[in-house]
Image: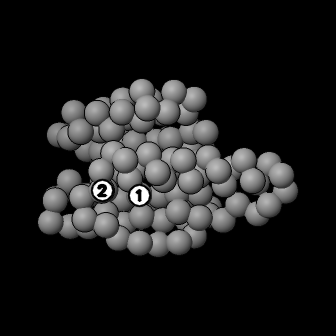
Amino acid sequence: MRILVAFEDEYLAYREVIAAAIRVLRPGVQVQSANLDALAQEVERLDPHVVICSGPNTVDPGGRPAWVVLPTDPTRPARICVGGRYSEQANPTVEVLLGIVDEVEEQLAEAEGGDLLLGC
């Protein structure tokens, strides 16, 4: 499974901590980080299953199993799409992000068995 974490360079530490936490806590997952300006190119290049980014989605999600818009402004809720289901949550924790990763891994395992994988 592939994950892309994209934030503006002024939030480089935030971007790298999220990516590192996922790498350490889910070692079987490939995690890449990028500048938010390169989001479209990185989505096309990496074809990630999960995208976690800081800005509004200006890229066609292209049926990705999960897309999380995690704003850097703590007063704005995160917008989460997993398997075609949308929700909002204030300040999601790393555990919430890991739960999304786990859910997508389960969906991918089921999809290998012939089930349809819903996208965002």
Question: Is residue 23 rendered to the left or right of residue 37?
Answer: right
Q: Which residue is drawn at 42% across and 27% down?
A: 24
Closer to the eye: label 1 or 2: 2
CA distance separating discs 1 and 2 = 10 Å
Residue 9 percent across, percent down from the top left: 23, 38
Q: What residue type is labelled 1?
A: Val
Q: Residues within 10 Å of mark 2 (few under 14, many from 20)?
A: some
Residue 113 percent across, percent down from the top left: 83, 52
Count of numbered marks: 2
Establish if 97 lies above or below 12.
Answer: below
Residue 48 percent across, percent down from the top left: 56, 44
Secondary structure at numbered mark 1: strand
Q: Which of 3 and 8 is in front in this view?
A: 3
Residue 73: quadrant of the picture:
bottom left
Question: Is residue 1 rendered to the left or right of residue 5?
Answer: right
Q: In which quarter of the image is the C terminus?
A: bottom right
Q: Residue at x 76, y 54 (%)?
A: 111
Q: Which amino acid does label 2 sit on?
A: Pro
Q: Name the residue under label 2.
A: 92
Q: Name the residue under label 1.
A: 68
The answer to whether mark 1 and mark 2 are in CB contact below 8 A is yes
